[in-house]
Amino acid sequence: MATLVEKFFDDKDALTKELSATLEQSLIDGIKDDGRAVLMVSGGSSPAAAYKHLSTLDLDWQNVDVAMVDERWVEPNHDKSNEAFIKSTLLQNFGNAANFITMKNDASTAQQGAEKCEAAYSALKTPYDVTILGMGPDGHTASLFPHADGLEHGLTTTQTVCAINAIQSDVTGSITERMTLTLNAIANSKVVKLLISGEEKLAVYKQAKAGGDVNDMPLRAVLNHPDIKIEVYWAP
């Protein structure tokens, strides 16, 4: 089992305040200890306010690498692009000076772009200072989706990234082709912050935590990993 610390908050403002403070400290410590800090970021509404707050802090952003946890294989100007979300929240103000590593490249498919993406991510400092994960109502995290084409590879490979083709559902929407950090890469983090909001997702998290087939709920692979330190942030 991973090392789990669960932090439950009364509201999202309290969660954002705590998350922002801990992310700031992790970046400061990473730069102090290693000369650079690496922040792996996810999309979604939960971290948006913390990203916006971080962007206003006068940190040594030139020594911060910001990289995507996962991405739909769409152009950066697409309304479903995680890259666009990060650029509009974290990479503003002072945060604009950070070095940004995206997943989407000029390859026509994620599978064809995996080698180039792997090379870019392999250049990053390890372990990463922080990896921010979300979780879907189907028990996916990053773009490790239940029973997806590429899931087994993503959970077992020693590589950093892999291409995923998810089974289309209400959760995935129409864009099923993704690039994602692998389980191995997620484990190569000083701390993983798992952000959850609402009672429905809390129930899904508890179901994943209770055990079962990782193919049904890939979050279980993260929760079961002995080398991962996870801080779970939940607010209603």
Image (tube, rainbow, N blue to C red):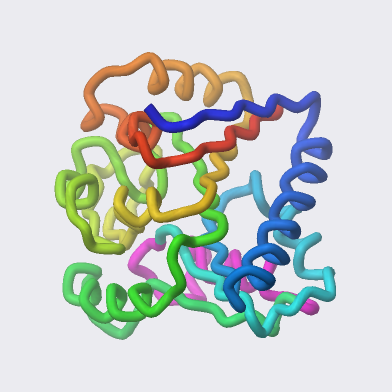
In percent of the image, x 30 and y 42: which residue is there? 145
Based on the picture, tell me whether residue 198 belongs to the magenta stretch.
no
Where's residue 216, x and y in %?
25, 27
| Span shown in magenta | 71-94
Left of 64 or right of it: where is 104?
left
* Horizontal and vertical percent position of residue 8: 70, 25
Residue drawn at x 61%, y 78% is 35
Image quarter where the C terminus lies is: top right
Question: In the picture shown, does residue 90 fall above or below 23?
Answer: below
Residue 170's quadrant in the figure? top left
User: 174 left or right of 101?
Assistant: left
Residue situated in front as seen by the camera: 69 or 183:
183
Q: Residue 87, located in which quarter of the rendered image?
A: bottom right
Residue 125 can be seen, yes or no: yes
Residue toward you, 187 or 99 = 187
Q: Is residue 44 above or below residue 116?
A: above
Image height of 110 relative to 193, above or below: below
At 72% from the left edge and 75% from the top edge, which residue is drawn?
95
Displayed quadrant of residue 159: bottom left
Which quarter of the image is occupied by the N terminus? Answer: top left
How many badges with numbers are in the image?
A: 0
- Judging depth in this view, the residue of 213 and 130 nearest the camera is 130
Residue 138 visible in image: no
Q: Residue furthest front?
A: 33
* Residue 78 lies within the magenta run: yes
**Left or right: 34 in relation to 161:** right
Residue drawn at point x = 54 percent, y = 39 percent:
194
Q: Is 41 on the left or on the right of 55, as rendered? A: left
Q: Position of residue 27 (x, y in %)?
A: 67, 64
